[in-house]
Image (cartoon, grey):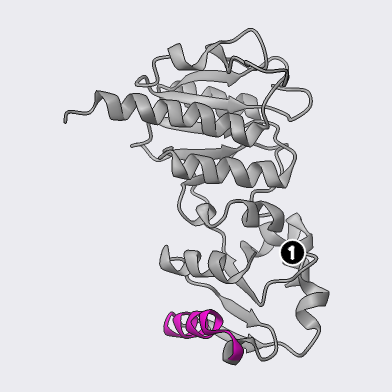
Amino acid sequence: MRRLLSRRAARRAERAFVAEGTEVVRTGILAGAAPESVYVAAGSAGADLAVGELVGMALDRGARVFELAPGVVERVATTVTPQPVLAVFPMLDLPEVPSRADLVVVMADVRDPGNAGTVLRSADAAGVGAVVSCGGTVDPYNPKAVRASAGSLFHVPLVLGDLPAAVLSGLADAGFRRLGAAVRGGEDYATVDWSVRSALVLGNEASGLPEGLQLDGLVGIPMAGRAESLNVGMACAVICFEALRQRRSSMPR
C-alpha cells in the first residue's frame, strides 16, 4: 500500500490506487467501485460508528478488511493527521471520452495534485462529460489529488490521455471546439456559446498553456480586483458552471 501511495509507476503497474478517509471511501463504494481491500486503524471500527458501517459495506461487496496494529496508519498515511480508513481501489479511467459528452475538461499541464483534484471536483459538480488528464499532468490518482477530489474521482468520467497535442487532435476529430483558458487575451467566458460541443483546456499553474497547441480560441475570466488570475481549479469551476447555466437556461421549463 505504501508503494501505491508514493509511486505513480506502482499505481500504473498494478492498476490500483489508495483512497484515504471514511467519506471518500464510502463515496467510492456507493458509486459502485468495489475496493480490493480496506485497512482500518486499530480499534476504530468499534469506536467510530461511521467506520463500523463502512467496514460492513466493504465486506458486503467482497472486500478484504484488515485492522492495522497501533501506529501503522500514522506511518503509512500521507497526511499529518491520518484518517482511520484507507482502501485500495482498481483504477477507474476510461479508454476514451464517452460519445455522449458535450463538454470536456482537458488538463494539459496541471502539476499540482490539489489543483487536479479540484478540477475533478468542479467538473463533477458542473456535470462535465469527462476530464482528460494529458501526459505531463500530475497523476490524478496521486493521494493528494484523490483527497482534493472529495470523491468526485468516482463520479466524473476520467481519461488518461497522451501528450496534449495528440489529445487535442483526437478531440477535434470527434467534433469538439478546443478552447484554452488564458490569463489574458481570451474571449470573456460568459459571452462564449457553451451549447457548442467544447473542450476546455487548462494549462500550467505558473506558465499557462503549453506553446504550440492547436486551439480554436482562448477564453478568459475578467478580473474586477487586483488578482492577476484565479487558481486553475477555481477557474475551471467558474467556466464550467457558466456552461451549466447556459445549458439549463436553454432547457424547456
Q: Which residue is rendered at x = 53% and y = 26% of the image?
A: 200
Q: Which stretch appears magenta?
A: 47-61
Q: Of helix, strand and loop, which one carries label 1? A: helix
On the question of residue 91 being in view, the answer is yes
Q: Residue furthest left?
A: 253
Indicate the position of residue 128 as horizontal and vertical percent values. Answer: 43, 37
Q: Quadrant of residue 7?
A: bottom right
Q: Which residue is rendered at x = 66% and y = 91% of the image?
A: 43
Q: Which residue is rendered at x = 77% and y = 67% of the image?
A: 3
Quadrant of image for the N terminus:
bottom right
- Vertical relation: 40 (above or below) 239: below
Q: Which residue is rendered at x = 28% and y = 25% of the image?
A: 249
- Vertical relation: 150 (above or below) 226: below
Magenta: main secondary structure: helix
Tag 1 residue? 5
Mark 1 crowdedness (10 Å alpha carbons): few <14, some 14-19, many ≥20: many
Quadrant of image for the C terminus:
top left
Q: Quadrant of residue 61?
A: bottom left
Give the camera-side residue of 248 and 59: 248
- Vertical relation: 217 (above or below) 245: above
Indicate the position of residue 109 as horizontal and vertical percent values. Answer: 70, 32
- Vertical relation: 177 (above or below) 77: above
Indicate the position of residue 228 as horizontal and vertical percent values. Answer: 73, 19
Is 194 within the magenta?
no
